Amino acid sequence: MDLTVVALAVLVAIAASGIAYALLFSRIEVEKKTTSRVTRLSSGATDGTQLKAARDRVQELSKRRKSVQDSLKDLEKKQQEKSRKFGDQSLKARLARSGLPLTPGRFYTFSAGFAVLMVLVCLLAGMPLMVLAGTAIVCGIGIPRWVIGFFIRRRQEKFLEELPNALEVMVRSIRSGLPLNDAMRLIASDGQEPVKSEFRRIVESQQVGLSTPEACARMMLTMPLPEVNFFSIVIAIQSQAGGNLSEALGNLAKVLRDRRKMKAKVQALSMEAKASAVIIGSLPFIVATLVYLTSPQYISVLFTDARGHFILMAAGVWMALGVFVMRQMINFDI
């Protein structure tokens, strides 16, 4: 083939391509611009959709956050009201917590009678007027309220000891097919005191129209303990959100047993410090008694001279302060 013919063909093809590009240039540019516009519009629509979805998510999160904040405020307000309600230290509430069949009127009558009896005993013994006044105050106000506090603490200890057993009975009853109300009635009829009487109050509260969570929450009125609060919270959560109640109560029983074991362990470890505090606190009284028995003239100045009275008063104040500090140092809350 001749090179001239080949070169001519190449030149003709190049010329035809140039003519075609010149004729089709405007159409190609229009198609490019159209494609670019369509791409921009589609990306803008996608961005708008994403932006709207992001705005919706932000609004939903803000609503959820506001709802959570409102719920927390309501819960805090209810907890404060519950604390004020369950922290009632009136005589009527303390008598109800002690489990004693006493009314405030009977309590005041017994306190006054005991105070009069002890004042008569001191009067027959020839005690001075100041001792008689102090005896009346201590025996009429101090000792009866200390006795009520003693019964309250003893009843709470018995309740904490028996509550895990009652919860395990409820777990077995629920797993066997009984409803929660029947399991509580079983504890109220066959349980051990004082758990039996407390669950009987729950059953009686249900009979007058209260719901199960409200009836369980009212137990805090007569048994203001954290363990009772745990129990009422478990019942309330189960009634609102559902779930495996037997498993929740079983876990609660295990937690209560572990708390009791930890409390016993802490008390065992702190017994040495408590014994030291008792010895240190009783040592001045023991020494004073021994000195009075061996040399009564030596120590009688404290009781006959005004300066001795001042020294005894100052020593009593410092002793009370020292006992209070030692008590706070060895008193552990679990």
Image (tube, grey):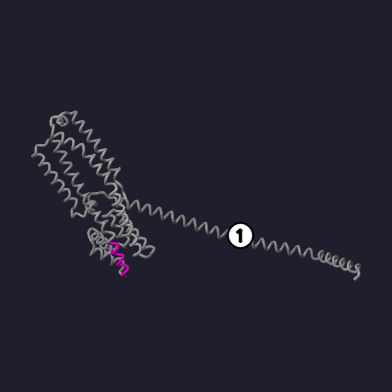
The residue closer to the viewer here, 144 or 293, is 293
Q: Residue at x 21, y 33 (%)?
A: 313
Dominant SS in magenta: helix
The residue closer to the viewer here, 269 or 190, is 269
Q: Does 294 sit left or right of 253 as displayed?
A: left
User: How would you rate the neighbour count of disc 1 (Cα within 10 Å): few for under 14, some for 14-19, many for 20 or more?
Assistant: few
On the image, the x and y values in percent for residue 199 come to 26, 61
What type is the residue that disc 1 sits on? Answer: Asp
Count the labels in the image.
1
Q: Residue at x 33, y 62 (%)?
A: 250
Q: Quadrant of residue 191?
A: bottom left
Which span is picked out in magenta?
Answer: 166-176
Q: Which residue is mark 1?
A: 47
Q: Residue at x 17, y 48 (%)?
A: 108
On the image, the x and y values in percent for residue 279 come to 23, 41
On the image, the x and y values in percent for residue 213 come to 32, 61
Q: Is residue 248 magenta?
A: no
Q: Quadrant of residue 6?
A: bottom right
